[in-house]
Image (cartoon, rainbow, N blue to C red):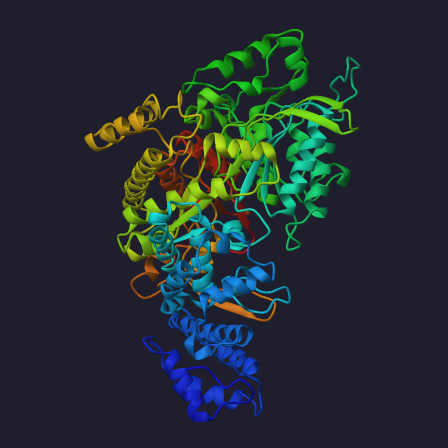
């Protein structure tokens, strides 16, 4: 039932409303009803009554009574029904109104794209509307329903509620499946709706926000490669501004740009290095915000042998010359094996100007990597540079650079770590290029190259034409499995089949503001199928974080996910064809499988099928941070441990008390070893186990107290590198006292 729309409800009606909302929940509502009676004032509007009921429910949430969050969520959902009913002119008691009329109305208002009405008949839309399952709104906890309602549901231009949660899931499913064969399209839409509405998976935030709407693209992140020219630097800045305006997070590789004091057109000492260009991007991040909601998000990567690396590592520090700081960008450093070896044995390291290396040596160091552990082309080229008497170089202890990295990490969380040799050894498309860096969230590793300006000319009608040779401008298309629901319900096999098709559809439907990104998207058809809810799943299975059992479980589970993802991309290739760059890839020659040690009968059979039938997608898996979408799904973020079993999310109106998902006496023992307590060496071991099966990378945060001994943090980095982990994300440090942190002192 719904509350009266104008005045305070009668006591009996209020009690009945609360009893209906509390059905099936393990909570005692008698004291709650009494407090509600005392709190709600006479002649209150329904909004005020609802607000009071939610606030009282939230006040009851603690570690012993987590289910009050669902009562608050159900009351909030009823208010959404009421507002949607008013705005769409239907009885809120029906919960959901006419689905076709919703699409027609929001299309007429310019909110929805015309595609939905152009591609689907009225009969098809009516049939899909009948498939909506309002009872699945009960799956949301309060933080989840509040997040999706305030950030993602489609409203009119005055922010009035029109779209409801199940309709958002269905619109996403319809939008992504719009170009499928009509004979199976309705079935595919309902499958995708099943996956989304049961919270078995989530799509990336841009897809969740923009699918079905007139504005915005569907991809999460991009990676640009800047060439060593004024044209490339400024073109890159313009491209990044366009992407930032549309809500994209951006990674930028600047390792090709000459260092401070380098020559320009033969004049020595003229270059000001990378820092001024980074500050320019910092200003772009601030001034070209993401759809008016937050600052742009840009991560800049630089090689650890670049002559400007020391000033680069100081960019985020809070002291020193502020003219040499860039506080609004994020930093990442690309690290070869040889550097980590020199750190480990306290050897020397040499810094070079990339422009001078090209001029004197005739090659670019960044264009090579070590093909084998301990040996390869990159280190031979590096040693040639060290030995050359014609090159300017700076000698520093490798450990001194590493100390500056760790100092910056403890103060600002960055730089992110990018282990370039391992990344390129595991690249499934090495025949098409190099991977220089990762993205803003460190989970994407795909081929990159700078776009090259060719010429500019004037045509007869005074039109000025600029010609470019497009480089590989990386695009991330993401969605993630909710491990805390999908694994216990044993739906991975059917779920991943749906996910791969949905992700592949994003590539064709998406409208990107950068042409070279569009071309790269089509060339590799890269997707990033990821996961969240790892700590949630461990708690449900009563597997403690700091155990060999957790490491083995990660290994086995992610091998299964990898198998199903590869299998379904191969099956989709049979139907729609391989990605254009398939021939020559490690998929096509079978090396992908032998490199991973996938040699048993099941894997050998899949390898043969892939070599015969191709792959629809050149890159497949990536584990993203998933902070917002995991909140919506009521699970834990990414592969991270939780911060606390009980905490509060701060919102404008009030704090939202939140507990770990499915918190009870059974799961508490696993959850109590939270992020800043759990031994991070076990986190490294888990991620090394899953990294083997993830063809791209993992957003892997390291949680430490800021009092951690430098030797312990160094050992964590060395362990990650030695374990074959490709990237690490933030070093998240806390100044508060940490109990039970024996590991960080050892």
Single out the residue that lies furthest toward the left.
601
Q: Is residue 511 left or right of residue 453?
A: left
Single out the residue that lies furthest toward the top.
389
Residue in view at x 39 percent, y 40 percent: 687
Residue 218 location, x and y as percent?
52, 47
Residue 72 location, x and y as percent?
45, 74
Residue 431 location, x and y as percent?
45, 20
Residue in view at x 66 percent, y 42 percent: 242
| Nearer to us in this view, 516 or 423 | 516
Relative to 40, say whether 520 is above or below: above
- Any part of residue 623 in sight: no
- Any part of residue 436 in sight: yes
| Nearer to us in this view, 319 or 686 | 686
Question: Which quarter of the picture shows residue 674?
Answer: bottom left
Residue in view at x 38 percent, y 42 percent: 500
Q: Is residue 668 left or right of residue 427?
A: left
Q: Is residue 534 left or right of residue 221?
A: left
Residue in view at x 47 percent, y 60 percent: 168
Quarter that holds the N terminus: bottom left
Question: Which quarter of the picture shows residue 429?
Answer: top left
Residue 193 location, x and y as percent?
38, 56
Question: How many numbered marks appear?
Answer: 0
Quarter that holds the C terminus: top left
| Nearer to us in this view, 331 or 175 | 175
């Amino acid at each position: 039932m719904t509350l009266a729309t104008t005045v305070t409800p009668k006591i009996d009606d209020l009690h009945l409303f609360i009893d209906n909302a509390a059905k099936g929940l393990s909570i005692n509502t008698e004291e709650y009803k009494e407090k509600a009676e005392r709190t709600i004032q006479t002649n209150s509007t329904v909004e005020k009554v609802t607000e009071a009921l939610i606030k009282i429910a939230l006040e009851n949430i603690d570690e012993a009574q987590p289910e009050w969050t669902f009562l608050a969520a159900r009351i909030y959902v009823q208010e959404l029904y009421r507002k949607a009913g008013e705005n769409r002119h239907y009885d809120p008691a029906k919960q959901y109104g006419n689905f076709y009329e919703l699409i027609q109305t929001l299309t007429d208002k310019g909110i929805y794209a015309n595609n939905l009405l152009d591609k689907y008949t009225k009969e098809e839309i009516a049939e899909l509307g009948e498939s909506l399952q309002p009872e699945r709104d009960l799956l949301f906890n309060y933080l989840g329903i509040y997040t999706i309602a305030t950030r993602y549901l489609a409203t009119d231009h005055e922010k009035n509620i029109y779209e409801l949660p199940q309709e958002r899931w269905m619109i996403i499913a319809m939008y992504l499946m719009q170009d499928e064969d009509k004979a199976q399209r309705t079935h595919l839409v309902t499958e995708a709706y099943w996956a989304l509405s049961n919270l078995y998976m989530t799509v990336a935030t841009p897809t969740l926000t923009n699918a079905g709407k007139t504005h915005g693209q569907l991809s999460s992140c991009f990676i640009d490669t800047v060439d060593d020219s004024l044209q490339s630097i400024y073109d890159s800045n313009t491209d990044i501004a366009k992407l930032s305006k549309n809500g994209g997070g951006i990674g930028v590789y600047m390792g090709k740009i000459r260092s401070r004091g380098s020559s320009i057109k033969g004049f020595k000492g003229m270059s000001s290095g990378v820092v001024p260009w980074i500050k320019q991007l910092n200003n772009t991040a601030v001034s070209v915000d993401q759809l008016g909601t937050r600052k742009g998000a840009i991560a800049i990567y630089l090689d650890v042998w670049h002559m400007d690396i020391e000033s680069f590592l100081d960019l985020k520090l809070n002291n020193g010359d502020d003219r040499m700081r860039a506080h609004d960008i994020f930093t990442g450093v690309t690290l070869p094996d040889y550097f980590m070896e020199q750190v480990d044995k306290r050897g020397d390291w040499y810094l070079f100007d990339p422009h001078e290396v090209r001029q004197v040596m005739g090659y670019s160091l960044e264009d090579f990597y070590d093909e084998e552990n301990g040996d390869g082309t990159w280190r031979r080229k590096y040693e040639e540079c060290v030995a050359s008497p014609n090159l300017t170089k700076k000698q520093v202890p490798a450990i001194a650079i590493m100390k500056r990295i760790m100092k910056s990490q403890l103060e600002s969380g960055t730089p992110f770590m990018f282990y370039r040799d391992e990344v390129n050894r595991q690249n499934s498309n090495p025949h098409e290029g190099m991977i220089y860096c990762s993205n803003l969230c460190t989970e994407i590793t795909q081929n990159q190259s700078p776009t090259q300006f060719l010429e500019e000319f004037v045509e007869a009608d005074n039109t000025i034409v600029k010609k470019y040779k497009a480089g590989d401008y990386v695009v991330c298309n993401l969605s993630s499995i909710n491990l805390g629901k999908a694994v216990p319900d044993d739906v991975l096999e059917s779920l991943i089949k749906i996910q791969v098709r949905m992700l592949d559809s994003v590539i064709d439907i998406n409208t990107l503001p950068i042409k070279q990104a569009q071309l790269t998207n089509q060339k590799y058809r890269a997707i990033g199928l990821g996961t969240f809810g790892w700590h949630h799943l461990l708690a449900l299975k009563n597997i403690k974080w700091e155990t060999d059992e957790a490491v083995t479980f990660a290994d086995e589970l992610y091998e299964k996910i990898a198998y199903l993802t590869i299998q379904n991309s191969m099956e989709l290739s049979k139907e729609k064809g391989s990605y254009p760059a398939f021939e020559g890839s490690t998929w096509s020659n079978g090396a992908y499988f032998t490199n991973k040690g996938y040699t048993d009968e099941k894997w050998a059979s899949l390898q043969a099928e892939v070599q015969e039938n191709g792959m629809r997608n050149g890159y497949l898996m990536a584990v993203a941070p998933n902070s917002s979408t995991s909140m919506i799904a009521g699970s834990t973020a990414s592969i991270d441990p939780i911060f606390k079993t009980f905490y509060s999310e701060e919102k404008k109106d009030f704090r939202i008390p939140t507990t770990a998902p499915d918190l009870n006496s059974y799961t508490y023992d696993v959850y109590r070893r939270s992020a800043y307590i759990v031994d991070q060496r076990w986190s490294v071991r888990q991620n090394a186990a899953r990294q083997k099966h993830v063809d791209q990378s993992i957003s892997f945060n390291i949680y430490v107290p800021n009092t951690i001994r430098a030797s312990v943090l160094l050992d964590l980095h060395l362990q990650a590198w030695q374990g074959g982990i490709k990237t690490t994300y933030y070093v998240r440090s806390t100044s508060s006292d940490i109990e039970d942190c024996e590991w960080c002192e050892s």
